[in-house]
Amino acid sequence: MEPILRFDHVTKRYGNGVRALKDVSLSIRPGEFVSIIGPSGSGKSTLLRSINKLISTTEGNVFFDGENVASLRGSRLRRSRSKIGMIFQNYNLVNNLSVLQNVLHGRLGHMKGIRGILGLYSEEDKENAWNLLEEMGLENFSYNKAGSLSGGQKQRVGIARAIIQDPKILLCDEPIASLDPSSAKVIMDLLRKMAQKRGIPCLVNLHQVDVALRYSTRIIGLHAGEVVFDGSPEELNGTAMERIYGTSVYNLVVGTSDETKMRQAYAV
Ligand code: ADP
Ligand code: MG
């Protein structure tokens, strides 16, 4: 199957000289649920942001849905972005608007001219928003202000807003980093369910290796901007973990609440 997303020898150098991505090549195909793991500062967010051109790359090319992202400007860039569902660590909701309005915001990129400016959503959009809120277990909160929700509920609104876009890919930057473990599980279960049901490939930045192991069809490991691992969860062994985190696996597991389980999971 043709990849929906392809990085071809991509390097990103920020103005301060930091090379955040180094010669990154990878492809994402429909049906994949791919986690990107790596220490803080390894380039995970930079990688995601180069897909919707929130940052421009320095060398190499990013191709999304058959287009070279670097060549996109104006309306073509907006159209490309409307095909990308983004989910953020801090939810990025409009807190003083209702949950329903926040979900409908996902449609704005698809609306033309005055309808978009005035937020004149179609009946179909409204019906889809209601159905998604029901699927997310938020039907009783539709008219509540988004700011009044718990973190886990806010992230469910974030997922609904991304899904209503009818995106060709979901990009999630640390979607559970601000959540407690039980809300995190709800969010990861919902993400996987929504992606699978609609056949949307998903690229998720995570710093929880155990979560990556449990949910992904494939894991990509970054270290200092370089892809140092790209394989199945089963292939992520102790050696790979050391390449990614640049330290002995023993140092990584000491101090975790469930050391034995971690050691088994990473086969050390
Ligand atoms: P991660 O998401 O894995 O923590 P980032 O992509 O945020 O990593 O950062 C990768 C590297 O690029 C880090 O060294 C970071 O300090 C640097 N960096 C990120 N954003 C900028 C920026 N806007 N300007 C300069 N350096 C940046
Ligand atoms: Mg980041």
Image (cartoon, rainbow, N blue to C red):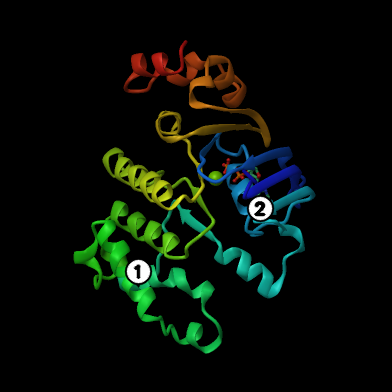
- Residue 68 falls in which quadrant of the image? bottom right
Q: Secondary structure at mark 2?
A: loop
Residue 74's disc is none
Q: Nearer the viewer, residue 240 or 71?
A: 71
Q: Residue furthest left?
A: 140
Q: Which amino acid type is shown beneath numbered disc 1? A: Asn
**Residue 30 spot, x, y in % from top left:** 54, 46
Mark 2, Cα crowd under 10 Å, few <14 / some 14-19 / many 20+, is some
Q: Residue furthest right?
A: 59
Task: Name the residue carrying label 1.
Answer: 128
Q: Is residue 184 visible?
A: yes
**Residue 127 spot, x, y in % from top left:** 32, 73
The total of numbered circles placed on residues is: 2
Would residue 25 be found to the left or right of residue 165 on screen?
A: right
Residue found at x 37% / y 60%? 160
Task: Name the residue carrying label 2.
Answer: 50
Residue found at x 66% / y 59%? 53
Compared to 230, does 177 lie above or below?
below
Q: Residue furthest front?
A: 1
Q: Nearer the viewer, residue 265 or 79?
A: 79
Residue found at x 28% / y 57%? 135
Q: Nearer the viewer, residue 178 or 202?
A: 202
Residue found at x 38% / y 20%? 255
